[in-house]
């Protein structure tokens, strides 16, 4: 499915910046990453804890609901499955919500996703990137520094939470930030699954 342009999209070489609210100002001393919800025991990680996890490099196509698509973008980050290895889930966990900072609230933004589609190399919490025009560089604060979730290409990019702060594990699906405002729960760009 690499380099496949979904219907209603146009290709761009740039990585446009779109976000709601303030740009989070990273503070390593106060930054935390929580694993919570349907877990046997909650986990709280420091930035150093997260950055000590095994790294994955993957090239992931991005499709924004505002109709742009960007191919051949390579990211380095931590695969979601690495966080799964740090906790024991309760039975029947099928969904997650990935939270991020929004106007100062560490859990003000969220996006819901089905867990079973996020276990490969294309579901990454990223901190640096490169493409055909640039060598490795940190993601910018406007793109979600210090850590931003990039979903597989089978989801629109609003599922890619910026300034991430944690993962909530769930048995039932729940609306996230944009879903509460009428966006699709499933967000499949190849079905133009933008709104409910």
Image (tube, rainbow, N blue to C red):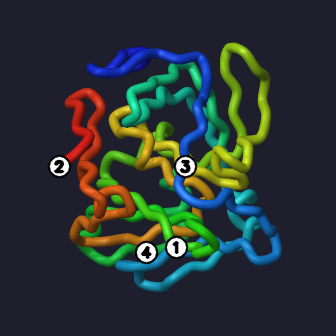
Question: Left or right: 102 with respect to 153?
Answer: right
Look at the picture and state if 165 lies above or below 140.
Answer: below
Residue 85 x %, y %:
51, 64
| Residue 44 vs residue 87, the one in the foreground | 44
Above or below 17: residue 70: above
Q: Looking at the image, is mark 4 or mark 1 nearer the viewer? A: 1
- Residue at the spot of label 2: 196
Q: Residues under labels 1 and 2: Cα distance?
A: 24 Å
Q: CA distance from mark 4 to mark 1?
A: 22 Å
Q: Earlier in the sequence, mark 4 or mark 3?
A: 3
Asked if marks 4 and 2 touch (Cβ < 8 Å), the reply is no
Find the distance from the CA under tag 4 to the CA under tag 2. Answer: 33 Å
Q: Depth check: 25 or 122 in front?
A: 25
- State whether residue 78 is above or below residue 92: above
Q: Position of residue 97 (x, y in %)?
A: 39, 64
Q: Which residue is mark 3?
A: 19
Circle 3/circle 2 CB separation < 8 Å: no
Query: Which residue corresponds to the image point at 44% horizontal and 63% vertical from the top-left?
Result: 110
């Amino acid at each position: 499915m690499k380099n496949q342009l979904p219907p209603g999209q146009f290709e761009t070489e740039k990585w446009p910046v779109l976000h709601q609210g303030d740009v989070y100002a990273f503070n390593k001393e106060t930054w935390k990453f929580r694993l919570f919800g349907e877990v046997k025991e909650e986990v709280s990680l420091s930035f150093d804890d997260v950055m000590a996890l095994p790294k994955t490099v993957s090239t992931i196509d991005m499709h924004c609901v505002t109709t742009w698509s960007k191919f051949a973008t390579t990211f380095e980050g931590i695969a979601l499955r690495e966080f799964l290895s740090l906790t024991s889930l309760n039975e029947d966990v099928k969904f997650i919500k990935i939270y991020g900072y929004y106007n100062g609230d560490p859990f003000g933004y969220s996006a819901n996703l089905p867990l079973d589609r996020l276990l490969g190399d294309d579901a990454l919490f990223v901190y640096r990137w490169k493409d055909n025009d640039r060598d490795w560089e940190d993601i910018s604060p406007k793109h979600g520094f210090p850590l931003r979730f990039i979903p597989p290409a089978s989801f629109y990019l609003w599922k890619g939470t910026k300034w991430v702060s944690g993962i909530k594990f769930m048995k039932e699906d729940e609306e996230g930030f944009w879903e509460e405002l009428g966006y699709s729960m499933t967000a499949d760009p190849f079905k133009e699954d933008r709104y409910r």
